[in-house]
Image: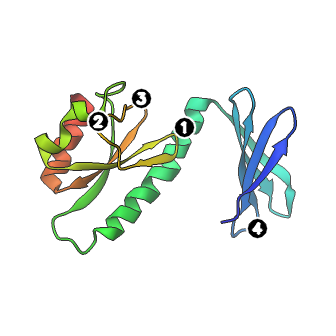
């Protein structure tokens, strides 16, 4: 996809791309930290048909909804032919402001965190000193039992 980035002097930036339907979809990132989801009119890609203001938290949530499933789907495809191994996206609620090492997840479950999705951005291969934040999604690879145990740990501690 070709993402166009347009500086908006005094305002911020506009990042958008053309979808198959002929519309442009994008985000305006304001200098003060606000975001706006924009969709062009079907018959005029330069005119806006929808504009939805988003708080930073809402933008992070939307980014996670859009980005994390794609990463998990890709990893599932990669592990498709390996019997007994699967990939799951798990919310990290019990370890916000703590390191990955503090979870002792691999030792306790045999499952491994291969990436962390934060604000729509993947952080691949996090090390033991990686610090989790509220809203992080851990991409975990392991057996079904290991993933169930990992979900309990990441959620409950």
Task: Assess disc 2: are there few (<14), some (14-19) or many (≥20) residues with their C-alpha within 10 Å of its C-alpha.
Answer: some
Q: Which of the 4 quarters of the picture holds residue 18?
A: bottom right
SS at circle 2 = helix
**Gap between marks 4 and 2 measured at Cα:** 43 Å
Which residue was labeled with disc 4?
Answer: 22
**Gap between marks 3 and 2 measured at Cα:** 13 Å
Q: Is residue 36 above or below residue 4?
A: above
Going by the image, does 57 lie left or right of 85? Answer: right
Which residue was labeled with disc 1?
Answer: 60
Going by the image, does 65 lie left or right of 75? Answer: right
Query: Tag 3 or tag 4, which sits nearer the N-term?
Result: 4
Query: Tag 2 or tag 3, which sits nearer the N-term?
Result: 2
**Gap between marks 1 and 3 measured at Cα:** 11 Å
Query: Tag 1 or tag 2, which sits nearer the N-term?
Result: 1
SS at circle 4 = loop
Q: Position of residue 10 (x, y in %)?
A: 86, 32
Q: Is residue 57 above or below residue 149?
A: above
Which residue was labeled with disc 3?
Answer: 134
């Amino acid at each position: 996809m070709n993402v166009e980035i347009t500086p908006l002097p005094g305002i911020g930036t506009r990042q958008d791309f053309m979808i198959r339907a002929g519309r442009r979809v994008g985000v305006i990132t304001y200098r003060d930290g606000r975001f706006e989801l924009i969709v062009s009119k079907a018959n005029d890609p330069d005119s806006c048909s929808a504009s939805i203001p988003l708080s930073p938290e809402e933008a992070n949530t939307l980014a996670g909804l859009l980005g994390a499933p794609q990463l998990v789907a890709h990893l599932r495809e990669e592990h498709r032919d390996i019997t007994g191994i699967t990939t799951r996206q798990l919310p990290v609620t019990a370890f916000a402001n703590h390191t990955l090492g503090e979870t002792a997840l691999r030792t306790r479950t045999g499952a491994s965190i291969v990436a962390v999705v934060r604000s729509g951005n993947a952080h691949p291969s996090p090390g033991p000193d990686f610090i989790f934040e509220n809203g992080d999604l851990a991409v975990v690879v392991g057996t079904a039992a290991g993933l169930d145990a990992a979900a309990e740990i990441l959620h409950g501690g």
